[in-house]
Amino acid sequence: MFRGLDEARAGGGTEAEQEARAQRFMDEYRRLDEGWDAAGIAIEDAAVPGPHGPVPVRTYRPEGALDGAVLWCHGGGFRHGDLDMPEGHIVAIELARRARAFVVSVDYRLADGERVLYPFPIDDVHTAWSWLAGLEEFADAPLGLGGASAGAALAVSTALRARDTGPREADALLLAYPFAHYPNPALDLDLYPEMAALPFRFDAAGVETMVRNYVGRISDVPPDALPGAARLDGLPPTWIVVSEYDDLRGSAELLERQLAEVGVPVESYLAAGMTHGHLNHPPRVHEIEESIAFMARGLKG
């Protein structure tokens, strides 16, 4: 296991020490995708004008005819992450390649607990979505929205906004281990014995800190901030990747039940043996490969 993950798993310390560990963690993840095969994929950086300033995006275009497009949002607890992390860069490459899709990865503003709070990240993602939906090239093509962890919550929130205000509704939602509820739903009791041995956990205090940093409070949380509390009917068909050993697994599974209850077609894939954030490893492991393939199939319908 690489050093950044070991240090991130250690936990504890001052806020500055935790931030330093998180930065080392992200630096290690970036090195994982060095040299990842992007053959046949044209990659470009751009920016889209938004209500809070330019929104950086990175586009991935495979060679040949396209079958659609997707907007992708990396994770990072609303506080960390960027376009270069494997959960952003490698996943975007592989979705473009496997689904024959034009992929737009969005570098939304990260919450800092003070100046950047909800709804800034959602505004940025919706800005990128509106730009993608307005491209004439994809006027008659299927458009998907997707993301991982916190990015999955932003994808759902953006789909809700698109449903209610436009400019165009999504045709598919691709969600990897979504964090969509606060309080975080408890795990099934039979998972606790196996989970107890994991050194990196999302405890109640950590989840509370994450929500407070994003929303600014832990009471009266707006329904679309963590959209498991929102009205979910009318959302597009949804594909959910669930990590088996994940303290946030309860949120993914509850979201699946909620969507099914209101008539949204939904399928899930349980990534056996995987922990939260497993798409931050290159798809050289079967379950990581299958997680990406599952979402690519979802985009194709």
Image (spheres, rainbow, N blue to C red):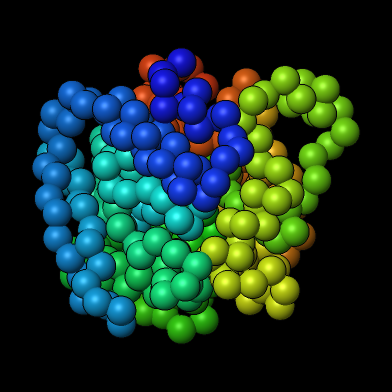
Q: Which residue is at a point 21% across and 26% down the rendered structure image?
A: 34
Give the mark count: 0
Please say whether residue 134 is visible from this viewpoint: no
Of all residues shown, which one is farthest toward the right? 189
| Residue 279, x across and y down, in percent | 44, 33
| Residue 20, x across and y down, in percent | 41, 41
| Residue 53, x across and y down, in percent | 24, 77
In the image, taking residue 11 as reference, residue 39 lies left or right, namely left
Give the image quarter of residue 55.
Answer: bottom left
Q: Which residue is at a point 50% across and 43% down the rendered structure image?
A: 18
Q: Which residue is at a point 53% across and 65% down the rendered structure image?
A: 214
Nearer to me, 216 or 86: 216
284, above or below 240, in the image: above
76, above or below 8, in the image: below
Nearer to me, 244 or 68: 244
In the image, taking residue 74 as reference, residue 84 lies left or right, namely left
Q: Which residue is at a point 46% across and 84% down the rendered structure image?
A: 165
Please say whether residue 24 is visible from this viewpoint: yes
300, above or below 246, in the image: below
Nearer to me, 104 or 206: 206
In the image, taking residue 178 as reference, residue 59 lies left or right, namely left
Give the image quarter of residue 271.
Answer: top right
| Residue 160, x across and y down, in percent | 53, 72
251, above or below 91, in the image: below
